[in-house]
Amino acid sequence: MFVKPPLSLYEAKKMGTFQVASVPKIGLLENMGLRVGTKITVQNRYALGGPVLLTVEGVYSIAIGKDIAQQIAVKEVAA
């Protein structure tokens, strides 16, 4: 069985549902609810290196800058 490797949050497709696989050690991310195992939905990725807008656990939306989004690994899951 083929298992897809994790990809960065910045590479994740719009409207896809993902589970966080790894997060850099930045306290603010944990305070925003981004922990390993958290389900997120990518709402939008803004052009020209802009932020990624996502919904955390289907409850609230946050925006993550490109530099940090590239450091967050996610795995695609069924919605």
Image (cartoon, helix red, strand yellow):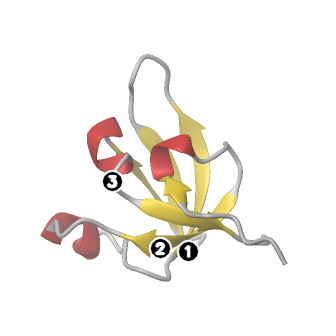
Residue 16 lies, in percent from the top left, at: 70, 54
Circle on res. 10:
none
Query: Is residue 10 shown above or below 73?
Result: above
Residue in the image at 38% along x and 59% along y: 72
For the residues marked 2 and 1, what is the alpha-carbon distance in whole angstroms? 14 Å
Q: What residue did someone put label 1 on?
A: 57
* Sequence-first disc among 3 and 2: 2
Q: Nearer the viewer, residue 56 or 23?
A: 23
Residue 3 lies, in percent from the top left, at: 73, 72
When asked about the image quadrant of residue 25, the answer is: bottom left
Residue in the image at 37% along x and 71% along y: 34
In this rendering, the label closer to the viewer, 2 or 1 = 2
Q: Inspect the image, locate mark 3, and give the three-letter code of the amino acid beneath it.
A: Gln
Circle on res. 21:
2
Residue in the image at 39% along x and 35% along y: 51
- In the picture, the quarter occupied by the N terminus is bottom right
Check if mark 1's residue and mark 3's residue have beta carbons within 8 Å.
Answer: no
Q: Inspect the image, locate mark 2, and give the three-letter code of the amino acid beneath it.
A: Ala
Tell me: 14 left or right of 9. Answer: right
Query: Is residue 62 shown above or below 40?
Result: above
